[in-house]
Image: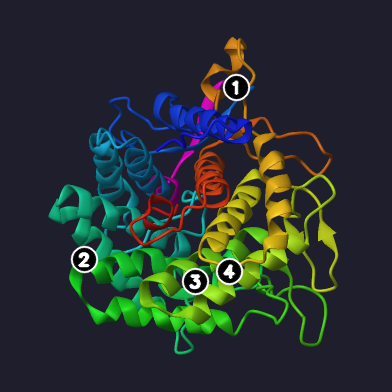
Amino acid sequence: MESKSNNPVTVELNEAATSASDWVLNSRIQSLDQQPDCHGAFYAWVDEDAAEENFIYPEITGYGITALLYIDSLQNKKKLMQRACLAGDWVLNYGLHRDFGGVPPRNQFSPHKILVTFDTGMVLCGLSHLFQRSKKPAYLKGARRMADFLIDHGQKGNGLFDACFDLVTQQWVDTPEKWSTQSGSYHAKLSLGFLQLYHLTGSEKYRTATERICDASLKLQLPTGRFVTYRNDEGAGPNAGATHMHPHLYSAEGLLVAGMILDRPEYIDSAARAVQWSLEQQLSDGGVPCFVSSAGDCNVNQRSDTLAQVLRMGALCHGVGGLPVSCLSSLARLKLKLLSYQNRIPNQPEKENGMGGFYYGKEINGIRRNHVNFWCTVFALQGLVAYRNMVLDGVLPDLEYPDIRYLI
């Protein structure tokens, strides 16, 4: 689905998106060897120094399923179903807990064994899309088992979700240690899988759960558009609590899709205000900080996944008419910053397995991390394509448009 425009900017975006897609498909980031416990799963990244892939786990493989279906829809060749099914089979056989309907995090071998709400939601989203395409009942059964586990046991009376389920105590856990260990608006992104199941089954249970988490998330958004994602931050008063940009954008992603599917303009407006706030934090080099404290202090260390999320959501919100025209110049600068993280240097054999992928970001000391990251790459792919289509070509997104339907 390349734009036919000869505009130099469009040509550059086409090349960058094609290169990112080629890396996803042709690198070793999806394990295609015959070792059963990893066959079909996705690695998190490629370590350039060691020339090896690191960390297979369910959340990333859930993203991988959706990414393969997304790339398939862009290329319109319908050739990636087999690989998506390999990933889906790995999830069912190795990723899904045998007694509970949840999945573990990357550090699943730590002494504190847990199942993670957000990770489970991303996997069930991939499986529900895979069922729609493949019609294999096992994928729908797995997706429903995960969704029912979260909704029946993990969703609280206020509509928010507990972050984790402790397998040792068999209790749900909500702690303020990190943004990912506490309830928050970022769980609005669970809407993507819930609403796909609502579409597939007609069960109002999944629609109701979506509305409850989205309505609860709106209450965690400040008038500025900022979502509080980390409540263990010093400060007092109405603005207490910090914001990690990564889950802040997860909140916006879930609300935008839920708003479009359920015809809830207040959700769309919330997502657009969140994106506008993110762009208001833009740094002089075109990027955005990864963290903003309750006092307004920024951690200017940048991550390509966050840059891609802001670009993607900015393009989509522009497409639905939710952003002022003044934001377009910010998106253009952000696009350039994101492209600077892509490995596009040819003729370097030692980096061949990373060619076309996106580096994660930089350490606190400013040195770039040496790994080419899978989720950063697929987020960037969608961000670049959405920017090209919505901002440059003026496409109006609908529910069947790949950047909405297969939001990663």
User: What amino acid is found at the position of numbered circle 1 in the picture?
Assistant: Ala
Which corner quadrant of the image does residue 115 belong to?
A: bottom left
Q: Nearer the viewer, residue 249 or 137?
A: 249
Residue at 28% from the left image edge and 80% from the top image edge: 205
Q: Nearer the viewer, residue 18 or 14?
A: 14
Q: Which mark is on residue 106? A: none
3 or 2: tag closer to the N-terminus = 2
Q: Estimate the spatial distance between the alpha carbons at disc 4 and disc 1, rounded to whole Å.
A: 44 Å
Seen in the picture, residue 341 relative to 218 is either above or below; the reply is above
Q: Which mark is on residue 50? A: 1
Q: Which residues are magenta?
A: 50-61
4 or 2: tag closer to the N-terminus = 2
Q: Estimate the spatial distance between the alpha carbons at disc 1 and disc 3, rounded to whole Å.
A: 40 Å
Which corner quadrant of the image does residue 138 belong to?
A: bottom left
Q: Is residue 302 visible?
A: yes
Q: In the picture provided, is 328 more to the left or to the right than 189? A: right
Residue at 33% from the left image edge and 27% from the top image edge: 32
Residue at 77% from the left image edge and 80% from the top image edge: 240
Residue 374 spot, x, y in % from top left:
51, 38
The 10 Å Cα crowd at callout 2, few under 14, some 14 to 19, many 20 or more, is some
User: What amino acid is found at the position of numbered circle 3 in the picture?
Assistant: Leu
Which corner quadrant of the image does residue 243 belong to?
A: bottom right
2 or 1: tag closer to the N-terminus = 1
Q: Which mark is on residue 322? A: 4
